[in-house]
Image (cartoon, rainbow, N blue to C red):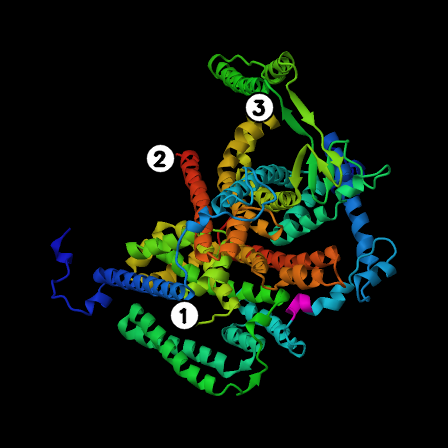
Amino acid sequence: MPSRDTNVAFVRTEFIEPSPPPSSTQGPVAWMRENLFSSIPYSILTLLSIYFIYTLLAGLLPWLFGGVWDTSSIRECREVIEGTGGCFSVLSERWNQLLFGISYPQNAYWRPALAFVLLFVAAAPVMFPAVPRQLLVFTGLYPFLAFWLIWGGTILAPMVGLLGFVAGYMAFVQLEKTNGFAAGFFGGIVAALIVWLLGGFISGAMPHFIALEAVASRNMGGFMLNMILGTVCVSLSLPLGIALALGRQSDLLIIKWICVVFIEFIRGVPLITLLFVANVVLAYFLPPGTNFDLILRVIIMITMFSAAYIAEVIRGGLAALPRGQYEAADSLGLDYAQSMRLIILPQALKISIPGIVNVAVGLFKDTTLVSVISMFDLVGMIRGPILASTEWNGVYWELWGFASLLFFVVCYGISQYSQWLERQLATDHR
Amino acid sequence: MSTLSDPPRESFQLSMLLSDTRYRGYTFQFIALIILVASVAYLMSNLFANLAAAGLNISYEFLGDPSGYDVNQTLIPYTSQSTHLTAAWVGILNTLLVAFMACLTATILGVIAGVLRLSKNWLVSKLMSVYVEAFRNVPVLIWILIINTLVVLLPSPRAYRGAEPEAEMLFGMFALTNRGVYMPAPVWGSGSLVVVFTFLASLVAIFMFRGWATKQLYDKGQDINKLWPTLVLFFVPTILIYFIMGSPIGIEYPELKGFNFQGGLEVQRPLIALWLALSIYTGAFIAENVRAGIQAISKGQTEAAASLGLRPNRIMNLVVLPQALRVIIPPLISQFLNITKNSSLAIAVGYADITATLGGITLNQTGRAIECVLLLMLFYLIISLGISAIMNVYNASVALKER
C-alpha cells in the first residue's frame, strides 16, 4: 500500500479565488456598451439624446443661474442682465399675488399658510397607517379649522357646522341600533339640519365672537384658490362618488337610472361647459334674489364633475370583487348597509385607490380651468394682472415655469404616494 | 322550494315599508322619485320666475339671426352676415378638425414614446420617462398657453421683408411667423381628379394584393414577396397618370406681399398652439397606456413565439401587438374623448371652436345663456356617447371568447 504523500495534492482541498470577470463585462464601460451602445441604431439614438439634452441644458442653465431676482420691472431686468439670464424678479416681487391672489389681506397671509401646513398634519393619519390613530380627531376637525382660518369671521360658524355633524352622527348611532340603517340615516340628517338651523341664528347674532378678519370668497386667488378647489372638491366628491357608484350597481331601477343618467351626462361634457353653467346659468335655477358667490357655485360644479368620474372608478372596483364576497356577506345574514360597509366597500375602495388618485390629480390640474371664467387662480393671475401690467409685460418663461413647477411638485408627489400605497396594500402573493 | 321555509303570513303593517326588505326597496325608490320630481319642479319654477323677472323666454330663434362677428378660421363659407347657427357649425367643424389632428399626432407620439420607454437603451428610456412625467403632471391649460407663447414669440411676417431679412423661410417654403405657419399648398388644376382617383384605386389595389398574398401563404404555403409589388403599385400608376394628364397638380408657395404672406396654406397660430399642446400632453398619457399594454403581455408569450423560431419583428407583429392592442385600445379611445373635451380650452388661445363661437361670442352677444350652454353640452354629449358606443362595439368584438 503506497503511503499517502500529503505534500503532493492531486485534488485541491480549497476553492480557487474566482478570477475577476473580463474587463469588457464590468465597470462603467461595459455598462455603457450594454445600455447605450449595444448596436448601431441604439448608438445613434444615444448620441441624438445626448445632443438633445445638451441643447436643453445649454439653454436652460444660463437662464436659470444667470437670472436676476431683485429688480422692479422687466426694463430694469433687461438693463442688468447680460446674455440670456432669466428675469426672476417677477417672482420675488409678485410671489404674494401668485400664491394668494390680489386682494387677500397682506397681514393675513399666515392664515392660509398655516392651513396649508396643517393640511399635512390632517392628511397624515389618513395617508400613512404608521401615524397614531388619535390624530384622526384632528383630521375630523381640520375642515372647520381651515374654513375659519381662510375665510375668517366668527369661530361660531364652523363650530355650528361641526356640531351639526356630531349631532347627526349621534342621532344616527342611536337610531340605527333600534330602528335600522335607513331610519338612522334620515334621523341623522334631520338632527344635523336642526342643529345648523338653530346654530345659524346664534352665530348670526354674534359675528364678533372670537373672530378673525373676514375675507370674502371673491378675494381668494392664486395658487391658494387651486389648492382650495382641489382639496375641497376631491374630499366632497369621494362620498358622493361612492353613493353614485352604489346607486349605479343597485337593483332599485329608479335609483339606478338616476345615477346612470347623472354619471354619463357629466362625463360626456367638458368641465368648461359645467363652469359656464356655474358662471352664467346656475343663477337662473336658484330662487329669485339669492346671491350665491361664484366660488361656491364653482365648487358645486367641480364636485359633481369629479364625483361622476370617481363613481366610475369605484364601480370598476365593485365589479372587480369576486361574486363570492357578495354572497358570503349575504350568507352571514348582513343586510345591504352592513354588507357594503363591512365587506364590500373596504375591498372595493382598496382596489380603486390608484384610479381615485388619478382622478384627484386630474381634477387638481383641471382647477386651472376656472381662469377661463375670469377667476384669478394661478393661471388667471399670470395671464391677467401680471402679464398685463406694464412692469412685467413679457416675462413669460419665468412665470409659466414657476406655475408648471408648483403643479408638477404637487401632482408628481401625489402620484408617487399612490404608487407607494399600492405596494403597501398589495396583500396578494405575486 | 319547500313550503317549510316560507315566512308565516302576517298582515301588512305600515312600518314594514321601512323595516321589511321586501318592501323597503319600493319605499326608497318612491322617496327618490319624489325628491327628484320635487327638486326638478323647484328648479324649473325658479327658472321661470327668474326668466319672467328678466323679461326673457326660452327660444332658439336667435340661431337664425345674423351673428355680426367674424371668425378667423372657417372651413365653410362664413361672413359676419351669416347666422349664429352657421357660426356654430363653423365652431363644430373647427372642434372636429383640431380633435382629429390631435388624435392622430398624439397616437403617433404616444406609441413612439411608449415603446421607447421600454427600450433597452438606458438614456432613451429615461428621457421618455421625463417626457411622460413632465407632461402628465402639469395642467394642459398651462401647456396650451406655453406653446401659444412660443408661437407668439416667433418673428412677425415683417421680419421676412427687406434685402437683409431678420428671418428666413425654412427651405424657402415654410414661413414660421407669430401669426401662424405658411406652407406650400397644392393647386388643383383640371384633371387632377383623375390623378386622385388613380391614387385611391392603387391604394385599394395594394390592399387587395396584400390580402391575396396572405391568403396564398395560408392556403398553399407560397411566400410571395409583398414589398416590391406594393411599392410599384403605390408609385407607378399615379405618377404615370400624373404626367399623362399633363401635370395638373401644381404647388403654390407662400409669398411675402406687403405686410403678410399670401398664397399657400396658412395654419393659424391658435390652431397650432392647441394642436401641438393637446398632442404632446395626451401623447404622454397614451405612452403610458401603450407601455402598460405591452407589459401586460406575459413574457411566456414572447418566449413561446421565439421558440417557434419567429424573428423579433414577427414576434412583435404577430404575437405581442395583437394581444397588447386589446389592452391598449379602450384607454386609447377614452384618451381621444379627452382630446375632444380638452379642445374646448381653445377659448384660452382664441381658436374658434364650438365653445368659443356658440358658448363664447354668441352667448355674450345674445345673452341666451341657457340655450347656448344647453346646445353646447348636447354637442359634446353626442360626440362622447357616439364614441363610447363605437368603443363598446369594438370591445365586444375583441373580448376574449371564453367558454
Subunit that carries the residue with mark 1: A
Residue B95, given in percent of the width and then of the height, sits at 54, 43
Subunit that carries the residue with mark 2: B
- Residue depicted at 26% across the width and 60% down the height: B25
Q: Is residue A344 magenta?
A: no
Are both tags, 2 and 3, on one chain?
yes
Where is mark 3, residue-wise? B309
Label 2, residues with CA under 10 Å away: few <14, some 14-19, many ≥20: few
Overall secondary structure of the magenta stretch? helix
Kindly report the distance in space between the C-alpha atoms of the residues bearing marks 1 and 2: 61 Å
Residue A5, given in percent of the width and then of the height, sits at 78, 37
Q: Secondary structure at mark 3?
A: loop
Q: Secondary structure at mark 1?
A: loop
Q: In the image, what residue type sits under mark 3?
A: Gly
Are both tags, 1 and 2, on one chain?
no
Q: Is residue A99 magenta?
A: yes
Q: Which residues are magenta?
A: A97-102
Q: Where residue B403 is drawn, which disc sits there?
A: 2
Q: Secondary structure at mark 2?
A: loop
Label 1, residues with CA under 10 Å away: few <14, some 14-19, many ≥20: some
Q: In the image, what residue type sits under mark 2?
A: Arg
Position of B311 relative to A363 (above/below) = above
Where is mark 1, residue-wise? A288
- Classify the position of the C terminus of chain B by image quarter: top left
Q: In this rendering, which labeled residue sits more in front, label 2 or label 3? A: 2
Residue B267, given in percent of the width and then of the height, sits at 65, 39
